[in-house]
Amino acid sequence: MVIDWLPSILIVVLLALGVIGALRRISLWRAGQPEKVNLIAGLMAMPGRYLNDLHHVVERDKYMSRTHVATAGGFVLSMVLVIAVYVFHVEQKIVTWLLLGALVLMLCGAFFVFKRRLNPPSRLSKGPWMRLPKSLITFALTFIVLTLPVAGVLPEGFGGVLLTLILSVGVIVGLGELLFGMGWGGPMKHAFAGALHLAFHRRPERFGGGRSTGLKPAQLGGESHGVAKPSDFKWNQLLGFDACVQCGKCEAMCPAFAAGQPLNPKKLIQDMVVGLAGGTDAKYAGSPHPVRKTGKEPGKEVGHAKGGANNIITAGLIEADTLWSCTTCRACVEECPMMIEHVDAIVDMRRFLTMEKGDTPNKGSEVLENIIATDNPNGYAPSSRTNWSADQNLPVMKEKKQADVLFWVSDGAFDMRSQRILRSFVKLMKAANVDVAILGDEERDSGDLARRLGDDATFQSLAKRNLATLSQYSFKKIVTTDPHAYHCLRNEYADFDTEGALKGVEVLHHTTFLNQLVQAGALKLDTFKGGKVTYHDPCYLGRYNGEYDAPRDLLRSLGIEVAEMERSRFRSRCCGGGGGAPITDIPGERRIADMRMEDVTATGAELVAVGCQQCTAMLEGVVEPRPEVKDIAEILAGQLIEEVH
Amino acid sequence: MQPNVVSLISIGRHPQSGRARRAEQDGRGVELGLKLAGEKLSVLHVGNPEEPVLRQYAGMGLPAMTVLKQDETADAVPALSDYLQQEKIDIVLTGVRSESGESSGMVPYLLAEKLGWPVVARVADIVSIKDGVAEVLLALPRGQRRSVTVKLPFIASVDNAAAPARQSAFGPGQRVRMESVNTHGEVDQIRVDWQEAPAKPRPKRLKTVKAKTAADRFKAATAKPQGGSGKVMKNESAAEKAKAIFDLLIEENVIR
Amino acid sequence: MSDIIRRDPRREWIARNRLHPLHDSVANAVQGEVRGPSGLLRKNPHQVGFIGPNGLKRIDRLKGNAVVGVGNKRSAANQEAVLPLHKVDNPDFYIVVVPDMVGGRLSGHDKDILGLAHTMVSTIEGNGAVVAVCFGESKETHYDLAGVDRLIHLSASEYEGFAPEARLTALTHIEAQLAPKHWLFPDSIHGGSDLGSRLAARLGERPAAQAWQVSGEQTVCRGGGGSLDISRQTPRILMLLEECGEAIDETRHEALAIEVDGISVSEPALQDKGLMDVDPSAIPLAEAEFILSAGNGIHNWDQFHKVATVLGATEGASRVAVDDGFMPRFRQVGATGTWVTARVYLAVGISGAIQHMQGIGQCDKVVAINTDAGCDMVKRAALSVIGDSEDILAELMLLAQARKKGSQEEQSDAA
């Protein structure tokens, strides 16, 4: 070889530059707030998390998962070997052949990446990401040619100076992208930040098949609440933003984006990256936050957002409306191959808007004021909470003190439509002779709405008061028809349960509980003779709590074969009713509920079964003609064979 | 020139839950005060400085508020008028009626009488202040407005028609600077003799029939009660239907 | 027409035959006097009397009371004219009522208070007279029937319009001259409670506001934001809620004028600049008295807006109309929008989702225009009209325009 040392020098220099960049990047994350993470255990668990959990998510798209395995696997292996061969001059034949094999593998992977990029779907970001497959191919090809003489396939010194120069350019391009770009914010940043993100993830419970969906409590008191500036995020949240590969899976799933509301989760995460690194979003090459056609104001196009680690986020980086468009349905989180927590970030920023600026849009402030003054969002008299059950003869805990099952009625008690669901459920429980009691007027709003609207102070106050009430009575199970209350009771109250009010208590959604009753043979049900039925998975039941089967089992027990929608189970599309979205009411091109109803109609179903009063309200809000909407409890109660005594 | 504005605040009461809250009209008074004086607005309360509801007012973005410390049973007016006399004030804003206590709505009038200032009742907005004269919009029923000018200083009671109070944020509410002033109020002696009971729903007046003859009384007693399901017009012509609606509108006196 | 009286044998036959299907219409058509063939006056014994509630025929021998007709009305008018006159000579004390006089006339609220004043007079020992103090131009012609024993009418221009300070000065003069036992004000937004509070502050009296059960001794008034009933001794100054008493309807009163002299009104601090022109569409939905609300059944939105303007109604909308972008969000009526309190709610093309029905729960009269006779809104409505909204709104607009024109002409005639 003419200039034998050139590749080695280049590798070392670029590696060093990459490390410097990486250290700089790390210092950017360290601007965030401290959060305790087990560094060693995290790093140890990282490969497992990558191979197992992350791969599971990527595996949903077989093409991409294989491509990524080939490319990433080939790259990591070849990089290690490149360093061994070219820096430490390990010149055993087997190693060089191994290197060649790894490079060919990577080349194949890179080729498929290239192929996908020929006609990319709109969710993918363009810009530097279009360059990436070419850089990958350059890297692989360069090192293949470079290694061939080493491996003895080609004679030493083949090609002369010209080839050496070409190869040097190839080395610079390839390694520049892969090593330099990794540390200095190129597309390959995702590999470095992503690996560390997996190691130091804020919700380690999510790995190994677990679920962690409850929001983290806000620290109350002090100079500020919530996240005002990027540096108010925890450091590992900032790290998480950097892990984004801009694959746009979130964008493709986001109901708000599809409805034309000004939220694109991918852009949101990239805005956060802009914020933490400082600068503008001019380099962003994906779809923007949707802008309503009618009101195209200047400054909303890509390139106008400015931010810095210590600048207020909503002053220039993103519009507040973007944050309020989110329904907290977690479709983006569920879909993200890098396991980024979009919803946490959005609620953190909402907390600042609500608790510091007092700027919850539309009906938000009224609803929060009502929750504070009356413990329900609509400002009804707390003493009228049990009016719905006047004819139900339901025992109240205050008198009964203990029961097997505590029925958490939720704020559906005030809504005439939801009361039908409640009555049906009570009818079923009575038929099954369940020892049940309700809290009556002692119950309060679960705090779900207040929390999603960013008012964690009110949520915490409600949670503490509810827990104090619960701790006075003894019961084995809490059952509720409202998945939002279910989620709070099951996943979020534990942070405040100092007295152990919910210790050893099973919190169940009514579909789970009814399914247990049906399986135990406590309910006699007639077969359902209506038409085609489909089932809509409520976000807070499905994605938040993993309950996909009980409702389907129940429908099956009625002899119903569920005609599944294209988007069902963990991919279910939100009804638009979560996260306070109906209250903040950010205008879009369409309504989320209408889109969901189109999904329903596409199955040809005449009835859509739901397990949530909020979903019922949203779907019933779609203009007729449309399929009928019924809660599973209502369908079951309709098929109940009542014994005559 | 920014006027010196004082908003008086009291502890409200939620009509449904009976819980203490930011009073509806007082909140609007603070909002109007913030519009007129911005950060310089002084907010004044008579009572217990520890009351958590005060933080709901502070959550509107008040850096500080003054509390004239006084027992709950004491009369607020002497303490207020003493305090207001010391300061150089252009406008005092109150609610029309408090949501707790006697709710007579006399505070602005008594203060005005003591201070010798004019009082403007049921203000919807203060439009402008020029050369010591304020242009004020008064709220009338059905959303009507009357324009009035008044010389500074004056006292205004703020109506429900004024701009609603902004959202109260938790953070600023926690950080407000409470300046507590000790006053000694006299116990309201007259009120001690009163009896208070939860409000009874007032009976709705029935249409009484004053009949001169037995036959008329009999007819009135046996007449079909009104109400039930309404009248439905199906097959009449559009003109007839419109006429029926129009007659009802005239009968209800909503068309002038 | 000739004078010859002609008979119609067929009609006579039908009139005689009570089983004939046309009997009723023929028998009822015969009104006034019926003459026989010889020209003699004939009485049809079948038409005398009426069918009583138990189905039996009743013959009323009391002339003038039995049959509702023109004669009856005349007799009622006669009776009103002879209402007994309630005279108070040399009264021992006065109770002064200061009515609102909205539009220059005594309102229902004012009349209730005048009635209450008389019941108070009757519970207090001695010979009391009820005095009404009226300011400004008065169109009221029936002070006597409303229970006014003495009338103080101050019509000078300084009391006209919005003049609380001048009126207060006048009231303090009356206080000095008559030393009334009680001052009664309507507790209303029309100025009654303002004036009452001003007088109480000036005289140093502790008034009772929002009073609703008053006798000479005891007063019950609302307190604590409407959550308390405070029972207390009846104070000198009272501000009374609506329906606090029964209006006078069985007596006439003298309504003798009392002159108050020597009132000197100083330059007021409050200068009235007159009423503002308020666009009905600018009135907040929750405050509006008459709402024209649009739903999914509206297709011609220009027409809808025009009708709202012509009728002077505030516009409302159902959720669907808002979602579809035809109306702004703040116009949405319902549990998820604004809870309205309108007296008349005219719902066009709204079938009535449950949340919507909750939101209009406090409305007095609901009128529905809808194509579906079975929808919930029709069930709730006091008057429902089934048909195409566009046609009906068009007719409604014509009627409203015609009326406007008529009233304008009337005004110009009067001028």
Image (cartoon, coloured by chain):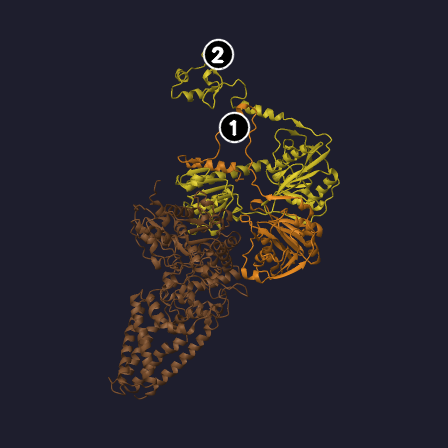
Whole-percent x, y for residue A488 in the image: 44, 57
Q: Residue A160 occupies which quadrant of the picture?
A: bottom left
Q: Residue furthest bottom?
A: A2
Whole-percent x, y for residue B186 in the image: 70, 51
Label 1, residues with CA under 10 Å away: few <14, some 14-19, many ≥20: some
Whole-percent x, y for residue A421 in the image: 40, 48
> Dividing the image into 4 quarters, which one contains the C terminus of chain B?
top right
Circle number at residue B220: 1
Q: Please report, as a chain letter, where disc 2 is located.
A: C
In the rendered view, tell whether residue A267 sits above or below residue C198: below
Whole-percent x, y for residue A39 in the image: 42, 73
Q: Are marks 2 and 1 in contact (CB under 8 Å)?
A: no
Which one is nearer the viewer's eye here, A544 or A336?
A544
Which one is nearer the viewer's eye here, A248 or C295?
A248
Question: Which chain is in orange here?
Answer: B
Tag 2 secondary structure: loop
What residue do we see at 54% from left, 19% from top? C63
Circle number at residue A120: none
Numbered disc in front, either 2 or 1: 1
Label 2, residues with CA under 10 Å away: few <14, some 14-19, many ≥20: few
| Colour chain C appears in | yellow
> Dividing the image into 4 quarters, which one contains the N terminus of chain B?
bottom right
Which residue matches tag 2? C40
Q: Amino acid at mark 1?
A: Ala
Question: Which chain is in brown here?
Answer: A
Q: From the viewer's perspective, tell me whether residue A253 is left or right of residue B212.
A: left
Q: From the viewer's perspective, tell me whether residue A385 is left or right of residue C76.
A: left
Q: Amino acid at mark 2?
A: Leu
Mark 2 and mark 1: span between their CA atoms?
39 Å
